[in-house]
Amino acid sequence: MQYAPTKQQYYSVFKTLIIVFLLLVLSNQNNDRLYGNETGKSLNKAPSGPAIHVIFTGEENGYLEPCGCSEVQLGGLPRRHSLINLLRKDDNNGIILSLGDIPGKVGRQDEIKMETTLKAFEQMGYTAHNIGEKDISMGIDLLGYLSQISSVNFVSSNIVNLNPQILKIEPYIIKEIKTKETTLKVGILGIVSPGLIDDVYQEIEVVDPIVSLKPLLNKLSDKTDLLILLSHAEIEDSIKIAEIYPEFDLIISGHGIDEPVLHLAKVKNTYVIPVGEKGKYLGTITIPPEFSRRNGDRSSNSFLPPAEIISLDKRFEDSPEMKILLKTYQQRLMDEELLAQVFKTDLPSNLTFIGNDDCAVCHNKIFRHWEGTSHATAYETLVKAEHEYDPECIECHVTGLNYFTGFETIESTPGLRGVGCESCHGPGSNHKETQSKDYGKADVEICEICHEDEHSPNFEFKEYWQKIIHPLEEK
Ligand code: HEC
Ligand code: HEC
Ligand code: HEC
Ligand code: HEC
């Protein structure tokens, strides 16, 4: 008879413990790969077991995908779709929310972007889009048209709709989420800060959100388990709303914040979470299935679910559906010949762009060296990326797009493809005649027109210039 375990038994228990430990570590790592812990963006650990995801994204600001100019860029609709698919793999009745501001600026390209992005929202299963000031600035006609045709609900709790015939907006939405245990009712409201609206519109009036939210909250508080505000306002204004209306569980805020996690705030009962702009991040709140507060005490918030902000980096693959959508978008830019509509500025004193071939006659050594740099093939880069009809890309990948006599199309101005001599030295028609030494001073400021933070985050003049420095000319 043996009462004390043998060495063997000790050993085997020890072995089991090690295996369990390893399994735990490994399963955690899997989680990290999905939720992005190593990026430091995680606010809280997601609970295990089936759960409901409330997913939210910030201002799009006209950013459909990373351009590919630098390795480290975040975001893009294709990655977002993959992540949403991952998150929703076991429930199909979650909630996906957009904070507002689809376009980046005004113009035809951004109109097409709005349609494209809304189509993407539909395919991803978005529940609601809050109206931001940039959406409004595209004009009430377009916004109205999109609000009519889109299956995504447009929501605003502080835009008074004076023309419901044109514009379809809801002051709030109640979304029901059915789980095995219960049915959750989630109230979704949205505001845009009146201070952000420049123009006056006949069809709408934007009122103080503090005033317009009050009656809505009175109505919704008892009827819902969770109240979410999409707050298209400065973070200070969002915090103020949280102080006045502790009924909100979650205020998704934005505006001018690109490093979202640094700004998380708990104000009384409410989490105020900026989610960052340009679709670079995706936020999610994971609600446990048994969550219900309707009969409980609203002011006690101890069981507020955890939130996470996930960086959309290379861990997430491009979804095929979104890639097709973006291809169609490029096709439309081509069909509508947007390159021909780019706004052009006059050059001073009748100067014109003449193209590299003319320079090559007198500066042959420099020209031949330039031919071997990536500046010379910058246009071909866009062809490879299937973006050569996209004015937003062409600008930095050819010579003189924004000036008369600069690049127009590859057929009409083939000599101005790529980042040519005159991209850095300026139009050379006069210098060709005079051969003046006063021509073409180029320095770091010229580089930084294209090598700016977004497209060339590692740019450092000395180092970059060394890579492409001209050879000495024989005199
Ligand atoms: C503001 C100027 C600018 C705009 C706009 C721009 N690019 Fe670029 N692009 C650059 C610069 C500068 C680089 C080189 C970056 C570096 O190496 O530091 C680059 C590099 C690239 C590269 C990588 C080339 C290689 O060989 O690695 C690709 C691909 C690219 N751009 C595609 C695009 C696309 C597609 C768009 C439009 C969606 C676009 N770019 C818009 C400036 C721009
Ligand atoms: C007909 C011949 C000729 C053509 C064509 C020509 N250059 Fe020159 N370039 C010269 C001569 C000569 C100088 C002066 C060299 C010197 O005196 O050191 C010069 C000087 C320059 C300088 C230096 C100015 C300085 O700071 O000293 C630059 C930059 C330059 N050329 C760029 C260009 C570019 C770009 C083109 C094409 C758009 C071009 N050149 C076309 C002959 C030409
Ligand atoms: C008109 C826009 C524009 C200007 C001005 C410009 N660049 Fe570029 N540069 C680009 C683009 C676009 C690329 C990427 C080309 C590609 O690979 O397709 C690039 C690529 C480069 C690269 C290659 C990067 C790599 O690692 O492959 C270097 C180096 C570079 N630029 C240096 C400079 C310097 C130095 C200046 C200023 C003296 C300058 N550039 C001015 C647009 C510009
Ligand atoms: C990416 C920007 C860029 C491009 C493209 C470029 N240059 Fe330059 N170039 C410069 C800069 C910057 C200097 C000044 C170098 C300095 O101050 O040391 C310069 C200087 C020169 C000079 C003065 C002589 C010298 O070597 O200092 C000549 C001539 C010249 N470039 C001709 C050309 C020609 C011809 C082309 C096209 C084949 C061309 N450059 C393309 C940026 C560029």
Image: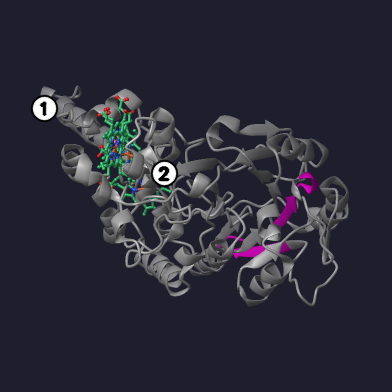
Nearest to the observer: residue 140 or residue 291: 140
For the point 70% across and 57% down, which residue is it?
Answer: 188
Nearest to the observer: residue 151 or residue 115: 115
- Mark 2 within 8 Å of ligand 1, using the beta carbon: no
> Mark 1 = which residue?
8
For the point 57% across and 64% down, which residue is it?
Answer: 114
> Mark 2 = which residue?
35
Q: What separation in Å lies between label 2 and label 1 (alpha carbons)?
A: 40 Å
Q: What element carries label 2?
A: helix
Q: Does the magenta stretch include residue 174?
A: yes
Nearest to the observer: residue 452 or residue 113: 452
Q: Is residue 395 magenta?
A: no
Res 360 → quadrant? top left
Ligand 3 rendered quadrant: top left
Give the percent coordinates (x, y) of residue 91.
Answer: 48, 62
Query: Upstream in the sequence, badge 2 or badge 1?
Result: 1
Magenta residues span 173-195
Q: How crowded is mark 2: few (under 14 residues within 10 Å), some or many (20 or more)?
A: many
